[in-house]
Image: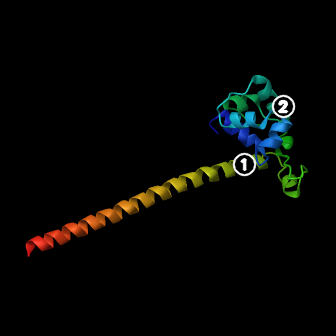
Amino acid sequence: MKTLGDRIRFIRGMTSQVQFAASLEIAQTKLSRYERNTTVPDLEFLVRLSQKYSVSLEWLITGNASRESPQTLGEAAEGLNADGHADEASSMLSVPGLQQELAMERMERRELTAENRKLHQEKEALLRENGELREKVARLEERKNHLSH
């Protein structure tokens, strides 16, 4: 996770931006700007985020050091279902680090999916170009055969 926005999104995990922003007493639009790195959060927000979700302030700001603060990551691992209650899957994710690992896997999967889409688009462009070149070669061979007769 290269940016502060990536680390905030990582802490949020599968919680909606609306729920996460409400838990931190900020507007969802502000959280969205933080996650997209278009606005830099103030120190008060970072401290509140660090304390509420038990992550190291140093890791949150710099990306260095351990994610874990001296407390456990249990609170950060609690997820809420659509009704705002912890569901069975969320309770399974309360093992420290498990939700973070899952979030990291999802982030990597998104990155791979985006790369796959890009490669697919490049392949399609190359196939079109290949088809055009084959047509051109066929026309040139036809012209060559026509001129040689």
**43 is higher (above) or lower (below) than 146:** above
For image coordinates 91% across by 51% down, the residue present is 85
The front one of 58 and 43 is: 43
Under mark 2, the amino acid is: Gln
The label on residue 114 is none
Q: Quadrant of residue 50?
A: top right
Residue 141: give x, y in percent of width and height.
19, 70
Tell me if 123 is positioned left or right of 131 in this view: right
Tell me if 9 is positioned left or right of 119 in this view: right
**42 is higher (above) or lower (below) than 4:** above
For image coordinates 86% across by 49% down, the residue present is 80
Tell me if 103 is positioned left or right of 26 in this view: left
Residue 5: give x, y in percent of width and height.
68, 36
Contact between marks 2 and 1 (CB within 8 A): the answer is: no
For image coordinates 80% across by 42% down, the residue present is 18
Q: Quadrant of residue 67?
A: top right
Q: Quadrant of residue 32?
A: top right
Within 10 Å of disc 1 (Cα), the crowding (few <14, some 14-19, many 20+) is: some
Q: Dot 2 lies on which element?
A: helix
The front one of 118 and 144 is: 144
Residue 45: give x, y in percent of width and height.
79, 28
In the rendered image, which residue does mark 2 sit on? Answer: 51
Distance between the alpha carbons at the discs numbered 2 and 1? 20 Å
Within 10 Å of disc 2 (Cα), the crowding (few <14, some 14-19, many 20+) is: some
Quadrant that contains the C terminus = bottom left
In the rendered image, which residue does mark 1 sit on? Answer: 103
**26 is higher (above) or lower (below) than 132:** above
Tell me if 120 is positioned left or right of 34 in this view: left
Under mark 1, the amino acid is: Ala
Tell which circle, 2 or 1, labels the residue nearer the N-terminal end. Answer: 2
For image coordinates 85% across by 34% down, the residue present is 52
